[in-house]
Image (spheres, rainbow, N blue to C red):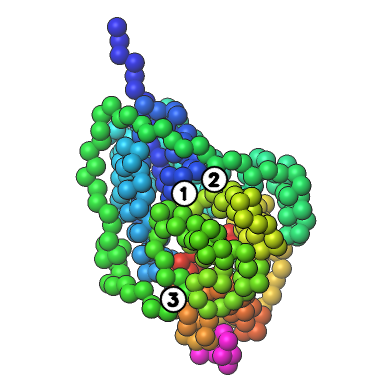
Amino acid sequence: MQKKQEKTGLIWFRNDLRTKDNCALVSAIKANDQVVGLYCYDPRHFDINEFGHKKTAVFRAQFLIETVTDLKEQLLKLNIPLLIYNKTPETVIPKLVREYNISNIHFQKEWTPEENIVLDNIKQNLPRNIHFFSEYDQFLYHPKDSHLTCDAIPNVFTQFRKHVEKRSIVQQERQPLEIINQEATFENNTKNITLDSLGFSKFERHINSAFPFKGGETEALNRLNYYLFESKKIGFYKKTRNGLIGPDFSSKFSPWLANGSLSPRTVYWQVKKFEDSEYKNQSTYWLIFELIWRDYFKYISLKYGSNIFKLTGILNKKYSWKTDQLLINRWINGQTDEPFVNANMLELKQTGWMSNRGRQNVASYFSKTLNLDWRIGASYFESLLIDYDVHSN
Ligand SMILES: Cc1cc2nc3c(=O)[nH]c(=O)nc-3n(C[C@H](O)[C@H](O)[C@H](O)COP(=O)(O)OP(=O)(O)OC[C@H]3O[C@@H](n4cnc5c(N)ncnc54)[C@H](O)[C@@H]3O)c2cc1C
């Protein structure tokens, strides 16, 4: 009798760097006999962009390395090896498909132009019989549960929030996984990447950073537990969330949410658990309210596609923007006429973090007071922020 052809699946991790509540991981385990994971440090993410900024500066690079290192350890508990490369996915994936006889590729669905181009390039270099399984996995309210067509996505946050709160649901977390019994173990000759190999010389975390945490799912879940159940700081969140200094005025979940080492559904259901076991107040609700802001920007980006990157923005409005390098440098280096702007910009430069209140003020100063091309400010934020998220930024 002919032996049944075994199926091998590849989980291509990008901004879903977790094992808890991860759609791609669950679907890969269900659909295949053997599963292998992949993370590519895409060299393009460390290049200098058109505005002269390194796309990823050292703060997020370090956070990413910590995240991927932890992901590798968590996956090993499921008997899944994580292959790690300092190369583009276009170079690596076709090679792995041949080498491991991969038939299915599972990944989180993205929709922004750079991610689309990468996926198209990969598809062009693979035989047609390779199956791609992708799903949105970065939302609190999954688009398919929202009852909103793209055109009908409200431009006004309150309308959006009321709609999803009334018409949509937050799905349960994906169930704990069965530990897979890999028939043949994959040889993993790849190693964790170092800062050095990404082109950085050294990194020292600033002693006064408001974000003194490490990357990775383990640290994310610890922080979630601390903010809710250990310190119960969530109970005051609405009063403190606009603070400026220190780790606890706000949740600091954003860097883990941004690279997907923490799922928004996990945060939601833990808040619900807190409300059931401890108490419910405006503050506990407000953390979810802010997660809806996060969703809102993702929905706006779904609706307007690449317009979110254009100078004329989603409303297609023309303003006269300046590109004065002296003014840009003063803003970056905290040398403007506004001490509040300067303090926040210095914090960003030295720690990779800035509070929400700080971000609103420095961004407004850059674009509305100095009338500088907003894309240059956004590009600097992209480079420096530990929690950079293309939609929220
Ligand atoms: C100019 C500008 C740029 C920004 N760039 C980013 C970015 O690149 N990445 C990013 O995650 N956030 C960005 N934000 C939103 C916000 O500043 C951060 O999410 C927040 O400061 C993160 O801190 P926290 O996790 O302690 O937030 P908390 O106050 O504890 O909020 C909980 C979570 O809700 C979400 N959230 C809170 N406020 C917002 C908001 N205004 N918009 C979207 N989501 C929100 C975040 O995921 C956050 O982790 C930006 C805001 C501005 C004004």
Q: Looking at this rendering, what residue extends furthest in the bottom direction?
A: 337
Left-right relation of 226 to 66: right
For the N terminus, give its image quadrant.
top left
Left-right relation of 289 to 195: right
Q: Point out residue 241 in the picture as x, y percentages from the top left corner.
A: 61, 71
Q: Magenta stretch? A: 335-341
Q: Is residue 167 above or below residue 304?
A: above
Residue on which disc 2 sits? 137
Residue under the point 57% across and 85% down:
341
- Closer-to-camera residue (32/263): 263
Measured in 3D between alpha carbons, the distance from the residue under mark 1 to the one under mark 3, in whole angstroms, is: 25 Å
Q: Does the residue at mark 1 contact the one at mark 3 (Cβ under 8 Å)? A: no
Q: Is residue 341 visible?
A: yes
Residue under the point 33% across and 74% down:
204
Whether residue 337 appears in magenta in the rendering, the answer is: yes
Measured in 3D between alpha carbons, the distance from the residue under mark 2 to the one under mark 1, in whole angstroms, is: 8 Å
Q: Is mark 2 within 8 Å of ligand 1?
A: no
Residue under the point 46% across and 37% down:
176
Element carrying mark 2: loop
Q: Is residue 83 above or below residue 253?
A: above
Name the disc covering residue 16, or none.
1
Q: Point out residue 260 in the picture as x, y percentages from the top left corner.
A: 48, 52
For the C terminus, give its image quadrant.
bottom right
Q: Point out residue 181 in the picture as x, y percentages from the top left corner.
A: 32, 29
Q: Amino acid at mark 3?
A: Ser
Left-right relation of 242 to 221: right
Q: Is residue 339 above or below residue 356?
A: below
Residue on which disc 3 sits? 209
Q: Does the residue at mark 2 contact the one at mark 1 (Cβ under 8 Å)? A: yes
Q: Earlier in the sequence, mark 3 or mark 2?
A: 2
Q: Point out residue 6 in the picture as x, y percentages from the top left corner.
A: 34, 22
